[in-house]
Amino acid sequence: MKKTIELANRFREIIINGTWIANTNYKDQLENLDWKIAVSKIDSLNTIAIIAQHVHYFVNGIKNVFDGGNLEIRDKYSFDFPEIKSKSEWKSFLTKFWEDAENLAKCIEQLPDEKLNQGFVDVKYGTYKRNIDGLIEHSYYHLGQIVLIKKIIFARQ
């Protein structure tokens, strides 16, 4: 199997459909989550919605590079999102998150294996492989936060 297909499948696993590493994924945790819970503030923690939007921000930013665009994402803006104020806004965001994640997975699959060790936009950002692996690892980190925040919210109800 091509290395890029393996990476694409690992990415899908964390966002859309896997259970191998964390026994869950973003879609499993968020798809049927009431929007009011997603935007519930617990002490100084980010909300589930903000964390999900943060991960989506990086998915979109990396996909933009695969589409031939510039690397426009910046850490300092990665938590700045308009507040989700309704069920329809939450559902709309989730639909976009799943679509964008699948589109990025397809881009990763189509990448020639030789490109994995080439510079991602600029040498200072590392290689394509490092960025894809970083996105996967970063997504697992935040998935853990979502799971814990949900447990806190449900324990307080």
Image: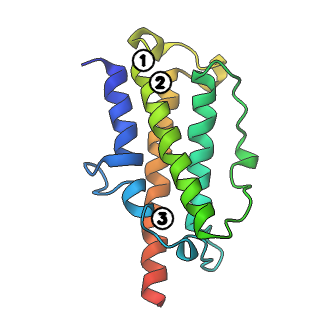
Residue at 57% over, 46% down: 56
Residue 50 percent across, percent down from the top left: 62, 61
Q: Hey, which quadrant is residue 93 in on the image?
A: bottom right
Q: Is residue 52 visible to the viewer in this orientation of the structure? A: no
Q: Residues within 10 Å of mark 1 (few under 14, many from 20)?
A: few
Question: Looking at the image, is 33 positioned above or below residue 110?
Answer: below
The total number of labels drawn is 3
Amino acid at pointer 2? Cys
Residue 58 percent across, percent down from the top left: 60, 41
Residue at the spot of label 2: 107
SS at circle 2: helix
Residue at 66% over, 22% down: 124
SS at circle 1: helix
- Give the mark nearest the N terminus, 3 or 2: 2
Q: Is residue 152 left or right of residue 70?
A: left
Identify the image's colour scheme: rainbow, by chain, secondary structure or one colour: rainbow
Residue at 47% over, 80% down: 152
Cα gap from disc 3 to disc 1, whole angstroms: 31 Å
Q: Nearer the viewer, mark 3 or mark 1?
A: 1
Residue 152 versus residue 8: which sits nearer the camera?
A: 8
- Give the mark nearest the N terminus, 3 or 1: 1
Image mark for residue 146: 3
Residue at the spot of label 1: 110
Q: Is residue 65 visible to the viewer in this orientation of the structure? A: yes
Residue 46 versus residue 97: which sits nearer the camera?
A: 97
Cα gap from disc 2 to disc 1, whole angstroms: 5 Å
Cα gap from disc 3 to disc 2, whole angstroms: 27 Å
Q: Hey, which quadrant is residue 64 in on the image?
A: top right
Residue 109 percent across, percent down from the top left: 39, 22
In the displayed image of the protein, which residue is found farthest to the bottom?
Answer: 157
